[in-house]
Amino acid sequence: MSYIDVFNGDADGICALLQLQLDSPRSSRLVTGIKRDINLLDKVQADAGDRVTALDISLDKNRQGLHRLLDAGAEVFYADHHFAGEIPQHPKLTALINTDANTCTSLIIDDYLNGKFRAWAVTGAFGDNLFQSARDTASKLKLDDGQMDELHKLGTYINYNGYGQSIDDLHFRPDELFRSLLAYSSPFDFIADKSSAYELLENGFLEDIDRARSTKPEFETENIAVYILDDEIWARRVTGVYSNELANQTPSRAHAVLTHNKRGGYQVSVRAPLQNKTGADELCRQFPEGGGRKAAAGINHLEKGALPQFIEKFRGQYE
């Protein structure tokens, strides 16, 4: 029997697995990638008796791989908050799926473990831009404002590290970052350790976000805004966290941040208005390679010629 842990390379996926591994340490094979690399079960080979954990990746996008693993006799534990479609009923599948716009995989695992490693769950929720849910969960820990701010920053930095067109764009491979974080039962210990990766993540984030803030909208109305970042590595790294920042600055407006991809088109990050956290997944699923969740979704490849069509549908969704 072997353990295989499959997880999204962003803050939510990493912090969800941290909680599970801290609760039940095990030697496992890690399968992950950049934030947008979500068809991860296609990369997994498992046999009867193997135990596969899948975290923060859409079941709908991994349906074929999931059925293949179950048919092979593997046991699958699946926790996620993205659009799932029909959830298979199978004796070897445990599925904790909650697509509510105010939760994430880290919070689902927090409930599953009865808050055993809650500070990591709060970190993951902050990273997924669920500020109110993070604060509500953190209230049970009785943190002061300074501690809350530390978890907010760390979640943002871990999430920032997951974005890019390829692993080479990232400061750390997500599996390497996970392993370094696993040495700390508390995120506060990681932050306090001067030998940790924290300072590099923070400096990289601050430099990249400062560049993004100088970008002017390509198109904007009262209800939506579309930004196109420069064709640079820093832009590919910062797209997700910059999208979150824009959403928080203007909570009544929907935002789309586009970066140039290696296929000659755009990668798109969409954030629904924080005052109406719905529709982002519906919008993105209208395009090939689009998907996500109600409040935040994306398109891996949008042809440049399809930009006017995207803006039209974007306006139709939110105006």
Image (spheres, rainbow, N blue to C red):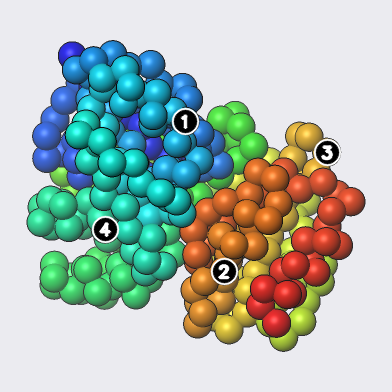
Q: Closer to us: mark 4 or mark 1?
A: 1
Q: Amino acid at mark 3?
A: Gly
Q: Residues within 10 Å of mark 4 (few under 14, many from 20)?
A: many
Residue 97 marker? none
In this rendering, would 257 be left or right of 72?
Answer: right
Judge whether 234 appears above or below 242 on screen: above
* Residue 169 seen from this side: yes
Relative image position of residue 295 (x, y in whole percent): 50, 66
> Answer yes or no: do the residues labelled 3 and 2 have beta carbons within 8 Å?
no
Kindly identify which residue carries mark 4: 107
Find the distance from the CA under tag 1 to the CA under tag 3: 29 Å
Question: Dot 3 corresponds to which residue?
Answer: 264
Q: Are marks 2 and 1 in contact (CB under 8 Å)?
A: no
The alpha-carbon separation of the residues under discs 2 and 1 comes to 25 Å
Residue annotated with mark 1: 64
Distance CA(mark 3)–CA(mark 2): 27 Å
Give whichever of discs 3 and 2 has the lower sequence position: 3
- Residues at discs 2 and 4 in contact (Cβ within 8 Å): no
